Amino acid sequence: MGKGAEAIGELTPEEKAQFAEWLHSVWKGPKECPICHVESWNQGDHFVYAPIYYQGAFVAGSVAYPSVILICDNCGYTLFFNAVIMDLLVPGPEKTGAGNGS
C-alpha cells in the first residue's frame, strides 16, 4: 500500500502532488463539471475504493478498485481515478479460487 495507508488511508502531501501532476498530464480539454459547468474542483483527502457488487450486495473481502477522488466544489459531482494506474498504490496479491474468474 501507499504511504497514506498509515494515516487511515489519508493521502500525504506528496501523494496529493503526484495526483495533481498526473491529472494535469492526462486531462485534456475543458475542466468544467459535466453537471453544473463550474470549474472548481477539490481533491479528496483519502484513498477510497469501489467494491464488487453481486446479486444485490457488496461482496466483503472481494476485489476492489482503489481510487483517488476529485469533487466538484459547487455540486459535489465526484470523479474516481484509479490509484494503481497513477502509481500511488501497488497492486495487492491476486486471490485465486471460486468467484474471481480463475
Image: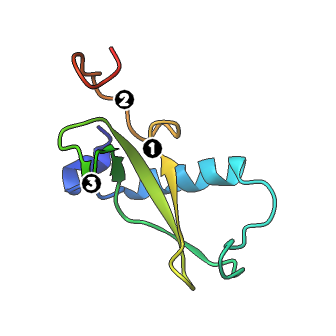
Disc 2, SS: loop
Q: Is residue 96 left or right of residue 50?
A: left
Q: Which residue is mark 1?
A: 83
Amino acid tagged 2: Pro
Q: Is residue 55 above or below residue 79?
A: above
Q: Which residue is mark 2?
A: 91
The residue lying toward the viewer, choosing from 51 and 44, is: 51
Q: Answer few, some or many: residues within 10 Å of disc 2's Cα (few below 14, many 20 plus, some between 14 and 19).
A: few
Q: Earlier in the sequence, mark 1 or mark 3?
A: 3
Residue 44, position as x, y percentages in the image? 42, 66
Q: Quadrant of the N terminus?
A: top left
Q: Answer few, some or many: residues within 10 Å of disc 3's Cα (few below 14, many 20 plus, some between 14 and 19).
A: some
Q: CA distance from mark 2 to mark 3?
A: 15 Å
- At 32% from the left and 14% from the top, the residue drawn is 102
Amino acid tagged 1: Ala
Disc 1, SS: loop
Residue 60, position as x, y percentages in the image? 18, 44
Q: Is residue 90 left or right of residue 95?
A: right
Q: Answer few, some or many: residues within 10 Å of disc 1's Cα (few below 14, many 20 plus, some between 14 and 19).
A: many
Q: Earlier in the sequence, mark 2 or mark 3?
A: 3
Q: Which residue is mark 3?
A: 9
Q: Is residue 4 left or right of residue 82?
A: left
Q: CA distance from mark 2 to mark 1?
A: 9 Å
Q: Earlier in the sequence, mark 2 or mark 1?
A: 1
Q: Is residue 61 left or right of residue 64?
A: left
